[in-house]
Image (cartoon, rainbow, N blue to C red):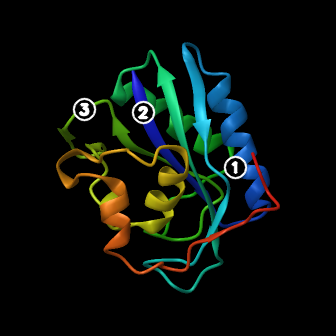
Amino acid sequence: MKAILSIGSNLGDKGGYLQFALDKITNLPNTQIIKASSIYETAPQVNLDQPTFFNVVLEIETGFEARELLFQFRAIEALANRERSIKNGPRTLDIDIISYEDLSIQEENLTLPHPRAHKRQFVLIPWMEIDPEAQLGEHGLIANLSNGLDDQGVVKVSELRL
């Protein structure tokens, strides 16, 4: 199954945490990274009193069902000492499933497609880099979604490439 992931970090070695996530995802059974965007630096969007983020978007193929994939990602975040004490607060690593095939889920811990992805340039801009024709469920073409938003402080960090 095809999934789109958004990975971010804004504590410590941000690029190192992104690479850590890629390495762990690559080592998951029946899972491979198909495409990876460049790294983008992003201003915080909700809790503004924190460092900037590094973000990357991945397209993966996986044999995991969506709920199990989320469980795997939470385990990877825990290995990176991710703390969830402050909502939208600083984090070593955040792995979000943006979409999973055409699946639509609304549960307490998993909503697909991601409910705020259509408003987040740090998801849309890197995703357009790897798949300019991508669609986000009922929201439509991601390029059209991105064109309707300001840049939200998203800047490509060209010297870093995963």
56 horizontally vs 11: left or right: left
Q: Secondary structure at mark 1?
A: helix
Nearest the viewer among 82 and 36 is 36
Q: Which residue is mark 1?
A: 18
Above or below: residue 91 compared with residue 104: below
Q: Give the foreground label among 3 and 1.
A: 3
N-terminal of the two: label 2 or label 3? Answer: 2
Residue 114: % across, % down: 31, 50
Residue 27 in percent (x, y) is at: 67, 22
Q: Secondary structure at mark 3?
A: loop
| Cα separation between marks 2 and 3 | 9 Å
Residue 3: image x %, image y %? Answer: 42, 33
At 35% across and 29% down in the image, what residue appears?
66
Please say if the residues under marks 2 and 1 sit with CB atoms less than 8 Å apart.
no
Choose top left, top right, bottom left or bottom right for residue 137: top left
- Amino acid at dot 2: Ala
- Give coordinates of residue 150: x percent, y percent: 41, 81
The residue closer to the viewer here, 52 or 72, is 52
Residue found at the far front of this picture: 133
* N-term-proximal mark, 2 vs 1: 2
Marker count (numbered): 3
Q: Earlier in the sequence, mark 3 or mark 1?
A: 1
Which of the image's four quarters has the C terminus? top right
**How far is mark 3 from mark 1, CA to CA?**
26 Å
Q: Which residue has dot 2 on it? A: 3
Q: Nearer the viewer, residue 18 or 150?
A: 150
Q: In the rendered view of the protein, which quadrant contains the N terminus?
A: top left
Identity, as a three-letter code, of the amino acid under mark 1: Leu
Q: Which residue is mark 3?
A: 102
Please rate how many residues cluster around mark 2, counting C-alpha atoms within 10 Å: few if below 14, some from 14 to 19, many from 20: many
The residue closer to the viewer here, 147 or 21, is 147
What whole-number distance in Å separates the C-alpha atoms at marks 2 and 1? 17 Å
